[in-house]
Amino acid sequence: MAVNKSCSYVEVHSCVLNGVSTALSESSSIWSELKELSEIEVMNSISCTFDDPFDFSEESWDQCDNMLQTTDNKIHVASNLMDMDQDPRKRLCFADGRRKVDYVLVYHYRKRSSVRGSPSQHRLSTISNGSYPLGVEEKDTEGGKDEHAEVVVDVGPPDPADGEKIIIREEFEGNLKDAGLEIEHDKENKAHGHAFIRLHAPWQVLSREAEFLKIKVPTKKSYELREEKGLAATMNEVWRKLNQPFQPKVPHQEQKHSRTKFLSHCFSRDKLHLYNIDSKDTFFDSATRSRIVYEILRRTACTRTCQTMGITTLIANGVYDSAFPLHDGDFHPSGQAEGKNDRQLLHDEWARYGAFYKYQPVDLIRKYFGEKIGLYFAWLGVYTQLLIPASVVGIIVFFYGWATVETNIPSQEMCDEDQNFTMCPLCDRVCDYWHLSTACGTARASHLFDNPATVFFAIFMSLWAAMFLEHWKRRQISLNYSWDLTGMEEEEEHPRPKYETILLQKRQRKKKNIKNKNEPERGVDESGELGKDKWRQRLLSAMAAGNPTGHEKLTWRDRMPGYLINISSILFMFGVTFSAVFSVIIYRITISAIMAMSPDPDVKSSLRVTVTATAVIINLVVILILDEIYGMVASWLTELEIPKTETIFEERLILKAFLLKFMNAYAPIFYVAFFKGRFAGHPGNYVYVFNDYRMEECAPGGCLIELCIQLSIIMLGKQLIQNNIFEIGIPKLKKLCRTLKDKEREPEEIVEQPGRRQQWHLDYDLEPFDGLTPEYMEMIIQFGFVSLFVASFPLAPLFALLNNIIEIRLDAKKFVAELRRPDAIRAKDIGIWYNILSGLGKFSVIINAFVISFTSDFIPRLVYQYMYSETGTMHGFINHTLSYFNVSNFKPGTVPSVSSLGKDITFCRYKDYREPPWSSEPYQFSKQYWSILAARLGFVILFQNLVITMSMLVAWVIPDVPKNISEQLKKEKTLLVDVFLNEEKEKLQLIQSLFSRDLTQEQQEELKVSDQTSLPLQQSQPGPLPPTSSPAPRTRPRAASFSQFTRQMSMSPQSNITQHTAV
């Protein structure tokens, strides 16, 4: 059998490094015999080498051909396609069906020419580290015809860049094999496409890296948890039974309630006897195995890239397209509850909308996706659970306002037509005078959210935010304990590819400058001493090229341009946000004026509702568009700062994105809450925009109802459109685009059959994981809606709760079924997000204090009732809040051209606290204004201090570490010390017994020698001799560390050597 001479260049070069295990199989009997061969025998039996991978000739092919010749037995080439009816677990393994695929590398290849030949002759596949063949190829049962087909082969790299990538890949994969990983290559049987490289970590590599990474594993030592007694035990048992229907049906979830706890300790190869190692293949779960392999990939260097980092740099440079761990098979249920893999369990018990009422299987999420993603879903679960009491209180506050709206005196006075309050026109010339009673509906709706219970709800939500943070800290500590993260040290991070690229360019510029300075001196004499200096400089430069980048770093001068661009860009983005808000204000003003000029009374009556609703919708659209733009701008600005590590990059990206998106989402709300209507002026002295349009004022019922409308529409719109529709629709659109792109390919390029695709092909078709920043960001913005302006919209927690119930299952489905499996990353906390939450919680106290004081009418009502009311009730409050204006004081051209209320109007009313026109200081702020302002500022100070004090009290009452976990940590530490002390004691006893045995044997040998020497003396000396003692010399210890045992042996009675007396 001759090797096909049209093998691809990649396969030939892999043959140089690893050897090629290829041939054709003709019968199953040959395959059954071949299966018994070991990896070493298969790999050692076949080898072919080329002196130069770029210059291989026909003799080289003939040499390989001769070396691959076999007489009777023909070796089968492993195929990467498996039948669907085989064991699903084997689809996650190498071709031998035993070694599990722990990681997959993908790269794109392209071939240049084609030849005619038999398909069976072009089945060359390179398998490193001795993979076993999959099986016998199926023969044509009908005729066995071997039809010739066109097979595309590679005769060389298409361009130098591709050739360089090939060499880099070979070097990198060679370094991976030197690190102990086993590699299986894919076949390149198309003109161009993606090739998959499977990686497997054997036990030696896993145990070595687990020890380096200090991965904690359970030991054989266990102890019984303290059993609760009394009322607490009864309450816990009742609560457990009530929660039983809401628990997910996960096998290992039941072990969580066991009273037996196994001690955990960092893995050590010297202490394998301490661990329950039933099988070395399953001792480390798939997430841990992939994390170990990823750590090797991340630190493996490739000198041709001039970088110190591994797979991240190669992906950034286009050497590889992607790298990812495999999912545990298909997520569709197999029908057998016991045989489900972790992915199927997560899909059935977590990623279905039908499981919305169940708790999340947080431990299984952590086991499958890692601690970082597990902490996110645990935090989201805690946040959603605590939204339940907040929603209940918000509903109570809302229904309280609904129940008391009929008895609310200010609302009754506004709706009373007998009061006949004639209000000043809302715009110049075209707007007419109007009666306050026409705003009855706005006043009644405003009372639903602006009532005395709102103050209580604002205080409650501030305490709720503090309680949420404290509860999460306790939950986080509990998860760290149950996930064996206590005492976890921060791992050293490798520099980012962009950082190393900039640093490399800096070093090259520095070397070039030094070379230019030394160039004139080199030209003097190159043959003498200067020639030696030349070679010395070359050697030093070569050594400097291999030095790690840790000796040099980027300074603030290198980053100064990026910082300047960051500051200017962020200020520009703030200007864009304010411009968008101002544009909507102009829209509201112009549309109000246009609708006011309409002769249709229905249009005029619906003016305020129409303008408010359309303006909020425009605000929502602008916010959604700017959100996407600001996300990309934040990433670009962070890249300009050249952060060294991924952690620093992520923190700076989060801060920028949060700052920009926070301003974008809340700028319209801040305007309505604190600025609208406060700079509009008063009749006769209005403030104009562009000298034509009057600044808008608040509604007759106050700005709080408009703030409620603005907040509700923006919050619900963002949740519905951005958080749900975008997350569902965008992945579907991307998948549809990929499907249409595949259909446009030529038929000959489609080789794989859909029913025979492997797991790595299926996973590659999924969307790559882009991090948790978008998931956290949308929840943090929602937390701001719930906490910052909750005084104006008590139903915000309810809508957030409903959204989160859907969001959890939506994110779960996305992680399980639509995304590639992320790398398992260890993390002890949620990072900088906790600081942002804490800042929002403190900021919410200030915002709610100002909303209650300045936006609502709570303080004016309080001041009127206790300072200005003659009866101590709210009767007359509306009249107290309205000031008088003499219509003769209108500026020319601003008086209503046509008035339907008659021409006998002398005074009109407007909402403000100003002196009447008949006072000595007309239209100036009255004493009531200053009294109410003082009361408002006093309430802000009182509210802030009260709530902050109560929040600190809540934080002090609730300990960060639960008492039971603190006790268990102390107990486990003591038990671990006892375990290691007993182990050392057993070692000492074993060494002592072995040493004593060796010493006894040496003494017996010396005794025999002394007896043999004393016998001739007895025969040669007939007379008696005086008794003399000749003790044996002290046995020399084997090692210095065993000297203490030697001294003990010499002092023991067994160490005294018997005295012999010569007669």
Image: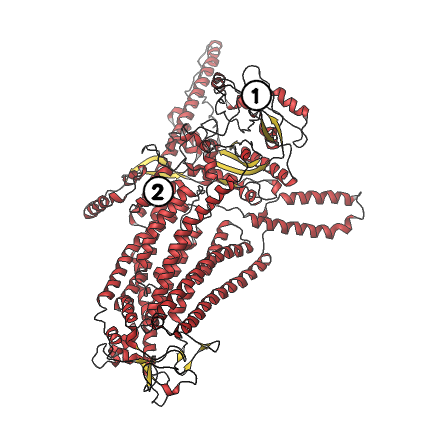
Q: Position of residue 747 (x, y in %)?
A: 53, 34
Q: How is the image coloured?
A: secondary structure
User: Answer yes or no: do the residues labelled 2 and 1 have beta carbons within 8 Å?
Assistant: no
Q: Quadrant of the N terminus?
A: top right
Closer to us: 405 or 659: 405
Q: Position of residue 660 (x, y in %)?
A: 47, 60
Q: Position of residue 580 (x, y in %)?
A: 47, 65
- Graded by Cα atoms within 10 Å as few (under 14), some (14 to 19) or many (20 or more), the crowding at tag 1 reads few
Q: Secondary structure at mark 1?
A: helix
Q: Which of the 4 image quarters holds residue 353?
A: top left
Closer to us: 630 or 517: 630
Q: Is residue 1018 left or right of residue 901?
A: right
Q: Is residue 108 left or right of residue 508?
A: left
Location of mark 1 (residue): 45
Q: Quadrant of the C terminus?
A: top left
Q: Amino acid at mark 1?
A: Ser
Extreme residue toward the front, this view:
599
Q: Residue at 40% across / 74% down in the picture?
A: 696
Q: Secondary structure at mark 2?
A: helix
Point out the tag, 2 or 1, that comes first from the N-terminus: 1
| Residue 725 in sight here | yes
**Distance in Å between CA atoms under marks 2 and 1:** 48 Å
Q: Amino acid at mark 2?
A: Asp
Q: Which of the 4 image quarters holds residue 593?
A: bottom left
Location of mark 2 (residue): 363
Closer to us: 428 or 26: 428
Q: Position of residue 180 (x, y in %)?
A: 52, 32
Numbered circle sitting on residue 57: none
| Residue 849 in sight here | no
- Graded by Cα atoms within 10 Å as few (under 14), some (14 to 19) or many (20 or more), the crowding at tag 2 reads many
Q: Is residue 992 above or below residue 563?
A: above
